[in-house]
Amino acid sequence: MSLSQALSAVGLIRPTRRRGFCPACRGWDSGTADQPGRAEREISPPALTALAFLALAAVAWVLMIWQSRSTGGMAMGLGSLESFAASWAVMMAAMMLPSALPLVYEFARRSEGRRRWRTATGVLTATYLSIWLGFGFACYFVLGAFPVPRAIKVRSAEWLSRWPACTD
């Protein structure tokens, strides 16, 4: 099985959908459509949506790695609501977008023929991330209302000190 057949089988590429016929354009074509048994291919729009999703997750991973290296011995803690929200949003984009990719791709693939399917896919993604952001805010406020006892903090600090990689 060739690569194009495999990609076509999973729906990532498909035969080109011509929206009309132009006799003059046929003369300028490279000839791939004229050869029997060989059709022109295009990347499906839901696959492009999935690719954009993965690109956004990759950028978020780069930002997460940059954030973790730039802490410079900063004390652990929740910090201000703004810094928590920014860090939580970057972490969500890095970790939750790849896990939501099958849902978003399948939604986009099934709704592609409908009007404003791209908007609906964007709303689905925004809703998914908003729910996780709300969960993060709930955790922030619960930890602010009920702080972790000092004994647990001391034990976890002792445990972390046993691992040199965690203290560098």
Image (tube, grey):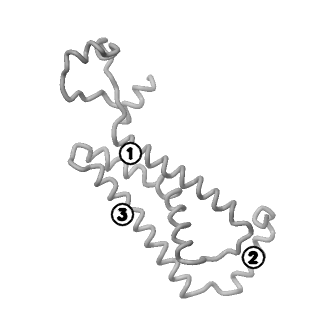
Tell me the SS state at disc 1. Answer: helix
Q: Position of residue 99 (x, y in %)?
A: 47, 54
The amino acid on which the numbered mark 2 sits, given as a three-letter code, is Ala
C-alpha distance separating marks 1 and 3: 16 Å
The residue depicted at 56 percent of the width and 87 percent of the height is 146
Q: Which residue does the image show at 80% across and 71% down from the upper left?
A: 161
- C-beta proximity under 8 Å, tags 3 and 2: no
Residue named by callout 2: 157
Question: Label 3 is placed on what type of residue?
Answer: Thr
Q: Which residue is mark 3?
A: 127
Is 168 located above or below residue 39 in the figure?
below
Q: Quadrant of the C terminus?
A: bottom right
Task: Give whichever of discs 1 and 2 has the lower sequence position.
Answer: 1
**Of 130 and 8, which appears nearest the observer?**
130
Q: CA distance from mark 3 to mark 2?
A: 37 Å
Q: Give how far apart the Cα atoms at labels 1 and 2 are.
A: 43 Å
